[in-house]
Image (cartoon, rainbow, N blue to C red):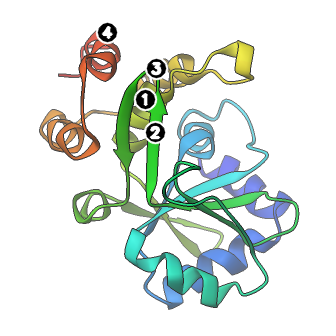
Amino acid sequence: MKSILSATLQSIPDLSIVIKKLSDNNIKYGLYAGAYVSLITSNRVPTDVDFVVADEDFDKLKVLFPHAQLKGDEKNAGGLFLYPSEDHQIEFMAKATVDMDGSHYNFKMTDLAWNNTSLMEINGINIRLCNPIETILLKAMLQRGADKGKHDLEDIEALLNFVTIDKNYLSKRLLECGQDERLLVVIRKYNLL
């Protein structure tokens, strides 16, 4: 598992610098999504790294990375995104909403989500990981398939072979995210509740 992140740190040189800045400035963040799946399942070396950041810390990121590219807005683009490197290999997301098939969800680094992150040390760098539930929830919200170059449900299945789900925490996060039947169908499919 650590070898995937070690390879990622080597393939994305700015990543270790970015992670150190996050830690030094007490930014509430967590690694999640495809890079998290890759790390946990060792199924591939990710080509980019996604972090979710607490809404209240997003402005701090803009100060820490003054030359970063900023995309999106809270009302139209599903959230705010910041890319500290020109190649967009590192992405920060905050104030996120997911609108899919008539459903509306909030996907944020809340205090509850922050309190359920963990630290992993790789090559002398401490990187904060989201609880696996964050990645599962986002992929259950999006439900993108191969037609979009994604494999959200397959990624959920892959993760479930490696992680243990805290069902109590999942129930609380479902309420925070705005659960509905569309989301619950996926959660029930994998017997997570």
In the image, residue 153 lies at what x, y percent? 51, 18
For the C terminus, which image quadrant?
A: top left
Identify the residue shown where x is 56% and y is 33%.
41
Judge from the rendering whether residue 8 lies leftward or rightward of residue 155; answer left or right: right
Q: Which mark, residue 101?
A: 3
Say which amino acid is labelled 2: Val
Residue 140 against residue 106 in the figure, above or below: above
Mark 2 closeness class: few <14, some 14–19, many ≥20 residues within 10 Å? some
Mark 2 lies on residue: 98
Q: Earlier in the sequence, mark 3 or mark 4?
A: 3
Judge from the rendering whether residue 60 lies leftward or rightward of residue 18; answer left or right: left
**Which one is closest to the eye, mark 4 or mark 1?**
1
**Which one is closest to the eye, mark 3 or mark 4?**
3
**Which one is closest to the eye, mark 2 or mark 4?**
2
Say which amino acid is labelled 4: Lys
In the image, residue 75 lies at what x, y percent? 49, 54
Identify the residue shown where x is 46% and y is 53%.
96
Say which amino acid is labelled 1: Met
In the image, residue 84 lies at what x, y percent? 74, 73
Q: CA distance from mark 2 to mark 3?
A: 10 Å
In the image, residue 10 lies at what x, y percent? 82, 62
Q: Which mark, residue 189?
A: 4
Contact check, label 3 and label 4, Cβ < 8 Å: no
Q: Earlier in the sequence, mark 2 or mark 1?
A: 2
Q: Which mark, residue 141?
A: 1
Q: Quadrant of residue 122?
A: bottom right
Q: Residue furthest left?
A: 168
Mark 1 closeness class: few <14, some 14–19, many ≥20 residues within 10 Å? many
